[in-house]
């Protein structure tokens, strides 16, 4: 007989949309075969709801100690945040706070910094891009979206398993970097990213969707880059989406290594 979801369970699951709900329960949620499958090996799964056919195919991948509930589509529909009911929904234990990348390592390993990126979908897209481009450490300012919100987890499509996000005072972190560490930022008055020399390591700062990089952080950048329109004098939209801009920037850094 299929289990019944109590009002408290439904309220707890719904509360995961908000930071205070995630803090209170110590959980975050992931939905869909791809997303859940990627995260199962990276975070402790407390409860997993899945269709019988998904369990038949992936049951051996579920870690011991996980509460597994064989569910119907109607039950999953009560929990899901998606338009289409996914075959599996999992509730993972929220990890402990992550510390920022060692400042000394930033000069050797490209690191992305996010300055008040507020849209969780953009954040998830950036993490997915970082995962693809081999950037596994992200430093985020206070005010940046939560990497464990449902929308960020969904947009990251499993990248959260390999890309960590550490929240801190971003200006203080930049000041702590060794002297001479390249600190890149994207600006409208920067140098053309396609022709600029780019280092193997350094910090790449990406700014807020509407306001860009804050003045405090901008003052600490020492390499100002521009992603130009094409052709350079063409009339175009006012700015790029921060997720797209991050993808373009990272591709340019990586292209220098081929």
Image (spheres, rainbow, N blue to C red):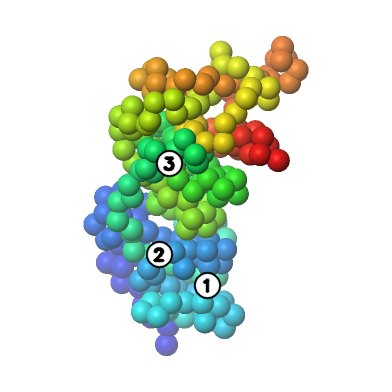
Q: Note whether residue 77 is visible.
A: no
* Residue 1 percent location from the top left of the image: 42, 87
Residue position for label 1: 73
Of 134 and 210, the residue lying toward us: 134
Residue corresponding to mark 3: 105
x then y, percent, for residue 248:
63, 34
Q: Residues at badges 3 and 1 in contact (C-beta under 8 Å)?
A: no
Q: Report the mark closest to the observer, 3 or 1.
A: 3
Horizontal and vertical percent position of residue 118: 42, 35
First in sequence: mark 3 vs mark 1: 1
Q: Quadrant of residue 235?
A: top right
Q: Nearer the viewer, residue 34 or 87?
A: 34
Q: Is residue 217 above or below residue 43?
A: above
Callout 2 secondary element:
loop
Q: Secondary structure at mark 3?
A: helix
Q: For mark 1, does the 10 Å Cα neighbourhood hold few (<14), some (14 to 19), or many (20 or more) residues? A: few
């Amino acid at each position: 007989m299929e289990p019944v979801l109590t009002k408290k369970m439904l309220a707890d699951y719904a509360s995961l949309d908000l930071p205070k709900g995630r803090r209170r329960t110590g959980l975050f949620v992931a939905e869909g075969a791809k997303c859940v499958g990627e995260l199962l090996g990276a975070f402790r799964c407390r409860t997993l709801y899945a269709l019988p056919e998904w369990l038949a195919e992936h049951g051996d991948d579920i870690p011991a100690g996980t509460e597994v509930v064989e569910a119907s589509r109607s039950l999953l529909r009560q929990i899901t945040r998606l338009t289409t009911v996914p075959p599996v929904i999992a509730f993972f234990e929220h990890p402990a706070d992550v510390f920022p990348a060692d400042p000394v390592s930033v000069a050797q390993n490209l690191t992305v910094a996010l300055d008040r990126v507020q849209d969780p979908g953009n954040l998830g897209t950036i993490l997915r891009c970082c995962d693809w481009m081999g950037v596994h450490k992200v430093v985020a300012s206070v005010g940046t979206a939560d990497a464990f919100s449902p929308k960020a987890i969904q947009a990251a499509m499993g990248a959260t398993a390999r890309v960590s996000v550490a929240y801190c005072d971003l200006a203080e972190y930049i000041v702590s970097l060794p002297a001479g560490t390249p600190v890149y930022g994207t600006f409208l008055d920067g140098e053309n990213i396609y022709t600029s020399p780019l280092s193997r390591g350094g910090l790449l700062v990406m700014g807020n969707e509407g306001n860009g990089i804050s003045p405090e952080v901008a003052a600490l950048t020492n390499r100002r880059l521009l992603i130009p329109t094409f052709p350079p004098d063409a009339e175009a939209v006012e700015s790029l989406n921060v997720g797209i801009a991050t993808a373009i920037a990272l591709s340019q850094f990586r292209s220098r290594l081929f």
